[in-house]
Amino acid sequence: MLKRIDLKRDYKKHEEEYLSAIRACCEETAFSGGKFADRFDREFADFIGVPYAQGVNNGTSALHCAMSALGIGAGDEVIVPANTYIATAWGVTYTGATPVFADCTPDTWEIDPSVIEDKITDRTKAIIGVHLYGQPFDFDGVKKIADRHGLYVVEDCAQSHGALYKGKMTGSLGDIGCFSFYPGKNLYAFGEGGSITTKVKEYNDYINMMKNQGCAVRYLHEITGYNYRLEGMMGAVLSVSLRYLPEWTERRRQIGRRYLAEINNPKITMQSHPSDTDPVFHLFEVMTEGDPEEFLKYMADNGIECNRHYPVPCHLQKAYEHLGYKPGDCPNAEKLAAHCATLPLFPEMTDDEVSLVIDRVNAY
Ligand SMILES: *Cc1c(COP(=O)(O)O)cnc(C)c1O
């Protein structure tokens, strides 16, 4: 069975390097924050091309920190795409603010700037755009509306490490960028991890306190704090992985471009990728005609594991039932959720495996 993603292949290939990084961290007992987490922060800030990166314990915490650093709280509203992983909205909810869900476009499947303006009220403080599946969203389209209404723009980059929008790194475009290093993301820790990128010192200083029990100076707590620090071992592993990220990204792009060029089954619709973006193919999502579970079963019978991202859009999740959304409120996101399927895509896939996926999809 070809897995949707197989992390063991990378581990086996670089095992010695990973283990020696972990050993170095153990020898220094730099377990919570510390030398290895700090070193990774500097490397990651350089990679994104911003002055500041703050490692945190996961991407959900990164989103929470971003919202708090921008002063968002109870009574505020933040516009969030309906088609995303639910954690994009949790960051808003944790502060007491309300996520307001916006539909995606029918072709890029990214947040649709043309529906945002109708959702803006005098309580709206920010827009979170998600570079979903590794495809940059229409940042300039979102930014234009944000500027017109004095709103912040936060990028959820949990799926877009290294993706470019008009030649610029995602995570360097908006007020704050939020990354996840959950295993299986394009850059991942051996456990949980996340990072927050910004050019603004004031946000960085706030987040440094927030993730660290509310203090800049030990035992002097200036704000409500959280324990959101990045673990040292995660930093140590991430420094190894970051060196391989450009190579992994190149391979993801090769595979993604082959799928786009060679999949020609009229029952399968693929995401469109505007020419001024350079995506990183975190997830290769397709829309099937009819029931995607049938497609998943067909692929599994052919030795190929697929899954789905995401079968229920955020605005129709039970956790947000109290907000009163109904089917039909975000039709493009709902259609995608009803028909989506994810093909295998990870850097260590062989050319033969890529060909097999293409062949089986075309024969569906
Ligand atoms: C993975 C993910 C997150 C959450 O990151 P965690 O590290 O799992 O907390 C947030 N947003 C998106 C779009 C994601 O894919």
Image (tube, helix red, strand yellow):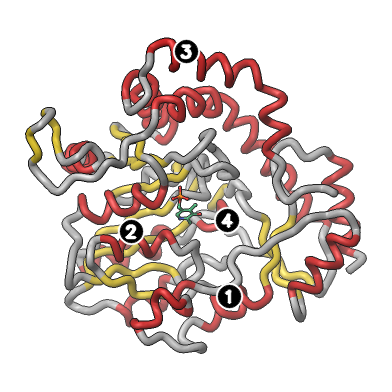
Q: In the image, which disc is placed on residue 106?
A: 1
In the displayed structure image, the side of residue 25 where residue 276 appears, left or right? right
Give the CA distance from mark 2 to mark 1.
Answer: 26 Å
Q: Amino acid at mark 4?
A: Tyr
Mark 2 or mark 1: whose residue is earlier in sequence: 2
76 vs 168, nearest the viewer: 76
Give the CA distance from mark 4 to mark 3.
Answer: 34 Å
Q: Amino acid at mark 3?
A: Ala
Numbered circles on residues, count: 4
* Disc 1 residue crowd, few under 14, some 14–19, many 20+, Cα 10 Å: some
Residue located beneath label 2 in the image: 91
Give the CA distance from mark 4 to mark 2.
Answer: 19 Å
* Disc 4 residue crowd, few under 14, some 14–19, many 20+, Cα 10 Å: many
| Labels 4 & 2 near each other (Cβ < 8 A) | no
Mark 4 or mark 2: whose residue is earlier in sequence: 2
| Labels 2 & 1 near each other (Cβ < 8 A) | no
Q: Is residue 242 above or below residue 358?
A: above
Name the element at disc 1.
Answer: loop
Residue located beneath label 4 in the image: 133
Name the element at disc 2.
Answer: helix
Q: In x, y percent, where is residue 153?
A: 31, 58
